[in-house]
Image (cartoon, grey):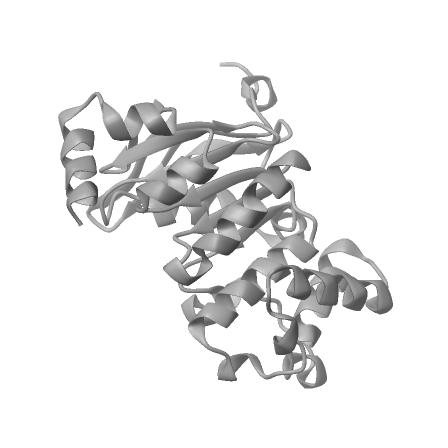
Amino acid sequence: MAPAAAQQSGLLSVRGVSKRHGIVQALDAVDLDLQPGEVVALVGPPGAGKTTLCRAIHGTEPIDSGVILLDGTPLPARGSALRAVQADIGLVPFPDPWVRGPRLLPRCPPALRRTVLGELTRAQVRARGVTPQEAERRALAELDRVGAAGAAPLVRAGLSESCRTRVALARALALDPKVLLVDEPTPALHDLTRELTRELADDGLALLIVTEEPDLAHDTADRVLFMNAGRIVESAPPAEFFSAPRTSRARDFVSRLLRR
């Protein structure tokens, strides 16, 4: 068997990744490559494994088998080495990390935990080793970039869902990742997603966007991946996938989307 690093063929490579949740096969031998500057839309019915795949790539969801490589190096399983790599793989979950669970945000002193700015500053100091002053400057710039500058001095629990998601995006971008995973941006964020996606891709970032909105996939993605029952079943350019999906499951899925 070839060494893991030799299997790499993209900035991010997923090889044979499987994961069970009880009796459910959430991921079933998934293969995926993301290249620098590439935008990929991941679509599929509820329960297809899209969120589990994003969490596995980020390292938040332990996998049962397979390997995930970033720049040819397998992701560490746990600990400080994994946290360091997670800075390179930004994850914006749905609805957002502060709602889904605490593991996506590091613990920090109460004085910093009280504000959004404190959270974003602490994340950079811990993951990137930058000075607090530089981290704060970057945090404010990214909050402004995503339209959430007013949230900087606020307590996170008091923010709207849309604002929390914008802050989650700003946090990921402030860490200067190589890969960005966006799990189902809400309709309120579609315009922001369209605006930022090409800008980020032009800077060399690889993006994987989970969405059930054909227009968003058409406007942002270089290719569409269709996922069903834990497997990636189809891969095609957006226009081709939404006009002429190859498999019956994909055709049923697209038909339901277009009837909404």
Position of residue 125 relative to residue 60, above or below, is: below
Residue 218, picture quadrant: top left
Q: In this view, does 198 lie to the left or right of 259?
A: right
> Toward which corner of the image does residue 185 lie, by quadrant?
bottom left
Residue 223 at what x, y percent from top left? 42, 28
Question: How far across and down, in percent of the image, does residue 61 sit?
Answer: 43, 50
**Left or right: where 78 falls relative to 111:** left
Question: Residue at position x 23%, y 23% from top?
Answer: 244
Q: In this view, does 191 lie to the left or right of 111?
A: left
Of 189 and 156, which appears nearest the observer?
A: 189
Q: Which residue is drawn at 65% across and 71% down?
A: 149
- Determine whether, in the image, residue 89 is placed left or right of residue 126: left
Count the marks.
0
Closer to us: 132 or 246: 246
| Above or below for 162 versus 150 | above
Residue 188 appears in which quarter of the rendering? bottom left
Question: Is residue 110 visible in this depiction of the protein?
Answer: yes
Task: Between residue 99 and residue 72, name the one nearer to us.
Answer: 99
Residue 155 x, y percent position in the rendering = 58, 83
Residue at position x 50%, y 50% from top?
A: 193
Residue 62, visible in the rendered structure: no
Query: Where residue 222 sits in the image (x, y, percent)?
Result: 47, 29
Furthest toward the top, the residue is 1
